[in-house]
Image (spheres, rainbow, N blue to C red):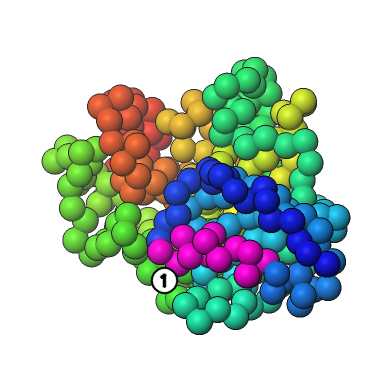
Amino acid sequence: MTIDFSALNGHQDMLSPGNPDVARLRAEAVQLLTQIDEQEQLHTQKVIPLPAGMWNALYRLEPAGVVAKLSPMENDFEVNFLRQAAALNIPAPKVFAAGHLEHPALPNATYFLMSYIPNSLNGWGAVHNEMSPDTIQQLGHDLGHALAKLHTVHLGYVTRFSTRVETWQTTLTDGFSPDWDNIAPNALFDDKLLPIFKRLLHKTGYFAFRDGSLIHGDLVLTNALVDANTHKLTAILDPAGYAGMPMFDLGYAAVPWDHGFDFSNAMVESYKQNSVQFDSALFYASVLVTAYRHERFHTSAVHESIFRDILPKLDV
C-alpha cells in the first residue's frame, strides 16, 4: 500500500531545526516513516506533519491515529518519563512503542509512537492570546500539582538526558552556561547582583546536589497542551531530563517573568499543598539560575524585580 506523504509539502515546524541532524531527520522523513510503518506494522495510509520544536520531528500516522516522534539521539529518558507520568495519572501522551532507526548519516536516531492529544493548543500561545486570568492561574495550579506528583518518585541520582552524571553542575553545564566554576557577569547579573548570586549558590551547595527525583526539566508552556475550549491542561510533553533537582524543575516552570506572578504563585502554592519537598532557598536559587541562563530575562525590568520580589525572600 502506498503511503500518502503529500501533507509534508510546504509544512512549517514551530521552530527551525536545532542542529543539522534534526534538519536531516525532517528532510528524510519519508524514508524514516516508511521504516517505522514496516517495523510496527501500522499499515499507514496518510502522514500528517505536526508543528515540532528545535530538537525533533513529529508526524501523525493515519488511520492508526498515533504520533511518531523522531529524534537524532537516544530517547530512553523521554520514553521512561512519559511512562512514569502515565503511571502517576499525570496528563501525558501514552507511549505505544519505541525503537531505533537505521540511517547511514544518523547512527543514533530513534523514534517512539505515542497517543495523539486531540482538540489541544500549545499552552504558551493560549496563555498570551486567549486565556482569562482565572484560567491562567488554574493552569499554574494544575502544573504545580503535576510536578508535585512527579517528584514523589525518588531516584537517588541525577542525569543529563539519558546519562547518569555525578552532580547537578554537570547537568546544567551546556551552551547556556558553560563554566559554573567561573561564573561570568552578563547583562542581568552585574557587579551588584552577581556576588549575591554566587553567595546563594555556595550557601545552598546548589551544584553538589545529587539526590535526584523524577523531573521534567523543561516545563515551559511550549511543552504543555491545553484544551482548545476549556483551556484546561491536557498534557505535558517534551521533557529535557529524567532524574534531577525538584526545586530546579519547579523554579524553571514557575519563573515569574514569562507569564506573571499570579501564574507563578499559583503553581508554587499548589506544589506546597501537594508536596513536602518545597525548599525556599533552592527554589529561589533555581529561579535565579534560570534567569542567568536565558537571555530573554536579561532586562532592566527583571533586574529590578529580582531585588524587589526575590532577594527579600532570601537570607543572602
Residue 207, given in percent of the width and then of the height, sits at 37, 63
Residue occupying image coordinates x 67% and y 40%:
225
Left or right: where does residue 40 sit relative to residue 112?
right
Residue 84 point in image, percent of width and height: 73, 63
Taking depth in this image into account, of 257 and 273 the one nearest to the observer is 257
- Residue 24 magenta: yes
Percent from the top left, x then y, of residue 105? 47, 77
State which quadrant residue 132 falls in. top right
Question: What residue sits 63% from the left and 55% below the top?
Answer: 58
Please name the residue shown 64% across and 21% down the image. Answer: 131
Q: Which residue is mark 1?
A: 167
- Residue 77 appears in the figure: no
The three-letter code of the residue at mark 1 reads: Thr
Residue 11 covered by magenta stretch? no
The quadrant the N terminus occupies is bottom right
Q: Quadrant of residue 61?
A: bottom right
Residue 6 is at least partly visible in this image: yes
Look at 57% across and 45% down and name the residue there. Answer: 11
> How far across and how far down the image is residue 243, in percent?
56, 66
The relative height of residue 3 versus residue 121 in the rendered view (above or below) is below
Q: Which residues are magenta?
A: 20-33
Residue 191 left/right relative to 300: left
Q: Quadrant of the C terminus?
A: top left
Number of labels in the image equals 1
**Residue 4 in the image: above or below residue 76:** above
For this orientation, the residue located farthest to the front is 2
Along the line of sight, the residue nearer the viewer: 200 or 13: 13
